[in-house]
Image (tube, rainbow, N blue to C red):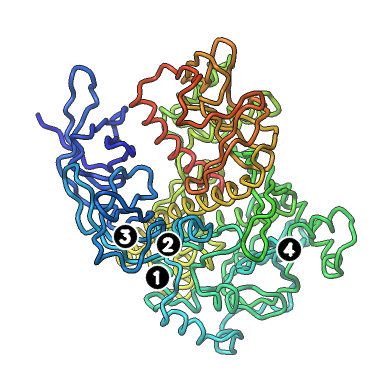
Amino acid sequence: MEKYYETIFIGSGRGFGFAKVEGVEEDFFIPPNKTFGALDGDKVVIEPCPDENNPNLAEVKKILEYANQQIIGTLAYGMMGNYVVADNPRIHKTVLIKPIDLNGANVGDKVVVKVTAQPSGDDDLLGEITEVLGKASERSVMEKAIVRANRIPDVFPAEVTELAESFGQTISSIDKAGRRDLTKEITFTIDGDDSKDLDDAISIEKLENGNFKLGVHIADVGNYVKKGNAIDIEAYKRGTSVYFPGYVIPMLPTTLSNGICSLNEGEERLTLTCEMEINDKGDVVAHNIYESVIKTCGRLTYDLVFATMKGEKTPEKYQKLKDKFALMEELTNILNAKKDEAGYLEFDLPETYYKLNEKGELLEVYELERHIAHEMIEAFMIVANETVAQHFYERNIPFVYRVHEVPLPEKSASLSAFMEGLGLNPVVFSKNVSPKEYQTILKMIDGEPYEQALNKVLLMSLQKARYHDKCLGHFGLASTYYTHFTSPIRRYSDLTIHRIIKDYLHKNVNADDKQLKLFVQQASEQASETEQRAVTAERQVEALKKAEYMQKHIGEVYEGVVNGVMPYGVFVELDNTVEGLIHIENLPTDEYDYIENTMTLKGRNHSYSYGDSITIRVAGVNLAKRQVDFCEVSMEYTPKDEKKDRPKRPKLDKEKIDRKKGNRRFKERDNKNHKKHVK
């Protein structure tokens, strides 16, 4: 009986490809003569056609959706005339451009191409250039190419900016009508030094019964961005703000995000407040959600709050709030203890700080120091998100939840096998894996030599957090109910939630609203997709910045830690968070085997595993590929295209190596997504 599967084609860059099918353990391999002209990302129909050598062989029978109607690449000239080489390394075909379709582009330019023909055979694509981004060698052009490749809108339509400007920068008495006036209460924001879109403020006090009253006040963006207006349509399309080192592509025009919606110091602002009474066990014993008006008394920063708490001399407005900071720390310790008891997963993952000059050139890159001031705001945002999510779940109101599902059984089994490979007692996970089981492993390996190795493998076993219209819990946070309520300036998911809250407060919503249910489902899918798009672009620009920085340090020696091992080489992370690859050709000559269950590259005389300390030399940088190459300090650097004195490759077949390359990219992307939103 014939079997057909709808799936996404994963290109290899060399003509062949792979396809993942849910419920099928191994990826299907699709040879070059059976791709039907499919390119990376195309939605296809495949048919398995196993033979005696490969039981997972398949061929593409039909292309359902073309994913590459727009391609970003560099214009070149050859025997066939003008052509564009795609930036996406998984697209092996070039795009032929007729002279009439050049639109002013010159050889060496980075361009945007509209694909006009995608032949089903081996022939190249045909296309026309729709935008010239500039010289491909310029850093700013490379960044712009990343934005275009990820289809991130970066220019607001005129009608959007005009509507945003029409709101002005002060709130009126009409806006304040019916809201609770909190302008006399002590509220303040705590953010990074360079933050401009301030969408959350807090207030805190100790009640006579010994409980805490915590107020989390969030910018009421929904007051201005009404469903269906020009700003809303554009915000839905963008889904999220995208943060790059030195600048941001905002979801909303800056007149809103940095202006009337931002909780700027000393200015009255409209907010949605989640007010909670929390006891000494960290339980929310009472809460209230309402529309409010606040006026913050301080635009505070993490570092200065921390300095004040340590007793250092800081500006007067910080000193006046020392008692509040003490209350915040006390409550944070209580909340963290409760989360720890529930199984909250705390990963020690570095965050990078980029110091740039006025031209956007990277001057310095280093690991960002995190301290109690960061923890306090995180703890308060988490408890507010949990409270809001539970409130609406219990009332059965259609809602957008932030979900992080239980790890898949096969992933937990791989984690257990990895532990056994390290010589540890393997964990036997229960049928319904709990956060506590994962947390037990984290605590068990704390401070051990293999901590980093197991930490990363544990991360890789987790699913990706996403948005959903059903409350499926948040595994990483050990939360039964969770949502994103706290950042409506930069996330459309939060804006959707705010609208539901406001309609609920004004009695304009009910549990059986079919239209709302449909929109919540659509908004959840859109938020997940645009978030992933943003995460990918952010990661690529950060890699470009780091490569640019290391270009100035070629030949220098650094201490690093192995944070990735693959059949083709070893990834090393430096103290400044820069990651580079020691390709297998630049490891000491040996006969290496790749030990899959321990992710170790092992030779007769040399061995490389996660967490190993290593001294490296910066060997080279490829800005176009955003890659940094290292070599062991004792080795001479050998470019990959040179054949002399190459060590033997690990004993893995070519197809499996390429499949692992692709899988590693997906896992890294998931991990970074987890890092951003679980913490």
Dot in front, 2 or 1: 2
Q: Which residue is mark 4?
A: 204
Type of amino acid under label 1: Val
Labelled pair 4, 3 in contact (Cβ < 8 Å) = no
Cα distance between the residues tagged 1 and 4: 31 Å
Residue at 37 percent across and 31 percent down: it is: 658
Which numbered disc covers residue 113?
3
* Secondary structure state at the residue bearing disc 2: loop
**Spatial CA span between label 1 and label 3:** 45 Å
Residue 325, percent across and down? 79, 59
Nearer to the camera, 352 or 256: 352
* Of the pair 259 and 28, the residue shown nearer to us: 28
Q: Which residue is mark 1?
A: 509
Q: Secondary structure at mark 1?
A: loop
Circle 3 residues within 10 Å: few <14, some 14–19, many ≥20: many
Density class for disc 4 (Cα within 10 Å; few <14, some 14-19, many ≥20) is many
